[in-house]
Amino acid sequence: RVDRNATEHHAHNRSTLNSHQISCRKMSQDDKKPKAAEKAKSAAKKTTKKAPSTKYRTPRLYMRGVVMGYKRGLRNQYNHTALIKINDIEDSKSAQFYIGKKIAYVYKASTREKIIWGKGFRTHGSNGVIRAKFKSNLPGQAIGRPVKVMLYPSTI
């Protein structure tokens, strides 16, 4: 007896849902036309062009990079050589351009920002990584932090 009541109840719910869905989906073509007109008006508003900005944006004179770590072998780590991955550089041939360029590691000291300067001196591997030596070795906290790879001195 309990099972039969449950099935009748579920059947009743199914029939009401279907009739409700059917009534919601029945729309005349007249109802749809004004909505299309409203969409066209809103699209026309979105396509209006803004006036060009009068501010002059100065070009960026550096590429962004990340300190990947130190040069190392299986057991030995060489702290005097840092590995720098330059953004958007994906091969060794492109990384050749950045050899000899200055690199700045900027960090916040207790009172002000400080900079450790370095220079890229050769590529590392085939994925656009360069090796760099800094004035003083980079601290361990620098790993994973951003650096600025300057576009000078230029050889072009």
Image (cartoon, rainbow, N blue to C red):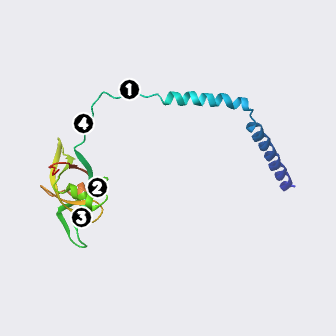
Q: Tell me: residue 74, above or below residue 63.
A: below
Say which of marks 1 and 4 sits in front: 1
Q: Is residue 63 left or right of residue 3?
A: left
**Residue at 64% from the left image edge and 30% from the top image edge:** 35
Q: Within 10 Å of the Cα at label 2, are there few (<14), some (14-19), or many (20+) other Cα atoms? A: some
Would you name the residue on which mark 2 appears?
144
Of the residues shown, which amino acid type is indicated by label 4?
A: Thr
Q: Is residue 74 left or right of residue 12?
A: left
Q: Within 10 Å of the Cα at label 3, are there few (<14), some (14-19), or many (20+) other Cα atoms? A: some
Q: Separation of disc 4 and disc 3 at Cα?
A: 32 Å
Sequence order check, earlier mark of 1 and 2: 1
Circle 3: element type: strand
Contact check, label 2 and label 4, Cβ < 8 Å = no
Would you name the residue on which mark 1 appears?
51
**Residue at 30% from the left image edge and 55% from the top image edge:** 89
Quadrant in the rendering for residue 76 = bottom left
Quadrant in the rendering for residue 133 = bottom left
Sequence order check, earlier mark of 2 and 3: 3
Q: Separation of disc 2 and disc 4 at Cα?
A: 28 Å
Q: Separation of disc 1 and disc 2 at Cα?
A: 40 Å
Would you name the residue on which mark 4 appears?
58
Is residue 84 visible in the rendered image? The answer is no
Give whichever of 7, 151 is nearer the camera.
151
Sequence order check, earlier mark of 4 and 3: 4
Give whichever of 55, 16 is nearer the camera.
55
Q: Quadrant of the N terminus?
A: bottom right
Circle 2: element type: loop
Of the residues shown, which amino acid type is indicated by label 1?
A: Ala
Q: Tell me: residue 114, above or below residue 130.
A: above
Toward the left, the furthest residue is 135
Would you name the residue on which mark 3 appears?
124
